[in-house]
Amino acid sequence: MTGPLAGLRVLEMAGMGPGPFAAMLLADMGADVVRIDRADRQARVGPTGRGRSRIAVDLKQPSGVERVLQLVTGADVLIEGYRPGTMERLGLGPDECLRRNEKLIYARMTGWGQSGPLAQSAGHDINYISIAGALGAIGRSDEPPTVPLNLVGDYGGGSMYLLYGIMCAVFERSHSGKGQVVDAAMVDGAANLMTTFHWNRSVGQHSDRRGTNRLDSGAFFYDVYETADGGFMAVGCIEPQFYRAFREVLGLDGPEWDNAQADVESWPQRKKDIAALFRTRTREHWCAAFDGVDACVTPVLSLDEVAGHEHNRQRELIQEFAGGRVPGVAPRLSRTPGAIADREPGELDDVLARWGTT
């Protein structure tokens, strides 16, 4: 394997959602990731299961647990996403693992965290972001909150903060020589992503009524507008120079537009005016009208359209993988770039030999 993380050995306890996605990103960057599938519960393999070896181990048997602990002795990182206490009951908790390998980074991914009254409760992305304040802040005025796929909790607040914790611990280990436990919770991460909005609300700079603020579809200059053919255009002309360019393309030259960005009371009417204009032409027309204009206006593409957009095409944003399409590796490194790769299911003895822990 090549990439900036070549040589980093990662054990992944098979699961779903943010843990596998984090492991995929590590593998994309060259880490040697080995996923432990339970012998009685084969994990579903999807696009986020790429780039690692897979071995099945019967964790109900002491011999299976011991074999995993053998791998632990050669691992840099262990990722697990079970409910708190599960790994301890299997005999693979942080105490046992760190006794075998004091340099191990033991990374735990949960929704609610390792402690607190909800720690043992079931939940999904929508639940974690609901009590973090994120879900209640997303949506249009006088409508229910909008579910933002499972990007905010599972992947933004989950995978990314898990990876951040792992990299922080790996860096600290380079000085101390010791591992530690990373407690990554989706509710923590989702709340952290809302830092600016929590602060703005606390000092009176953000309305608690969703859909009335600058970035939540309240502002006419930061919203999505339907076109004549049922398409949509995304408008984000916040800065004065972009707003001026936006006005020029649409012919918004009346005095009512001069200070409209600051006149919050006028936003609903200005939005109606712009919506009516966009509905007079097709999406293709508006793409051509704004082409080369710094007005922060772009088409809203469907998943099927993303690969064909000229910018995305030139950057090879979407790539072929396992009979389907997936986005390429991000971010892009100049000297040691990552790469999408796949591996066949392996044998535990092969991994033990590769890691020198036989």
Image (cartoon, rainbow, N blue to C red):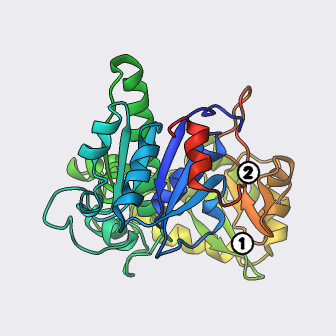
Q: Position of residue 272 (x, y in %)?
A: 56, 75
Binning the other alpha carbons within 10 Å of mark 1 as few (below 14), some (14 to 19) or many (20 upward) gives few
Image-based side of 178 in relation to 9, left or right: left
Binning the other alpha carbons within 10 Å of mark 2 as few (below 14), some (14 to 19) or many (20 upward) gives some
Residue 13 vertical position relative to residue 203 in the rendered view, above or below: below
Depth order, front residue of 98/196: 98
Mark 2 sits on what residue?
341
Q: Are marks 2 and 1 in contact (CB under 8 Å)?
A: no
Residue 14 vertical position relative to residue 340 in the rendered view, above or below: below
Residue 142 vertical position relative to residue 205 in the rendered view, above or below: below
Q: Which mark is residue 105?
A: none
| For discs 2 and 1, the disc positioned in front in the rendered view | 2
Q: What residue is drawn where x is 22% and y is 56%? A: 114
The Cα atoms of the two marked residues, 2 and 1, are separated by 26 Å
Q: What residue is drawn where x is 85% and y is 54%? A: 313
Work out whether mark 2 precedes mark 1 in sequence or the reverse, and give the earlier one.
1
Q: Quadrant of the N terminus?
A: top right
Q: Position of residue 290 (x, y in %)?
A: 78, 56
Q: Position of residue 177 (x, y in %)?
A: 36, 21
> Which kind of residue does numbered mark 1 sit on?
Ser
**Residue 145: quadrant of the picture:** bottom left
Q: In this view of the protein, can residue 355 be seen by the observer?
A: yes
Give the residue at the far left of this rendering: 117
Mark 1 sits on what residue?
302
Depth order, front residue of 244/311: 311
Q: What residue is drawn where x is 80% and y is 75%? A: 282
Image-based side of 23 in relation to 122, left or right: right
Q: In this view of the protein, can residue 25 be seen by the observer?
A: no
SS under mark 1: loop
Depth order, front residue of 217/148: 148
Image-based side of 235 in relation to 97, left or right: right
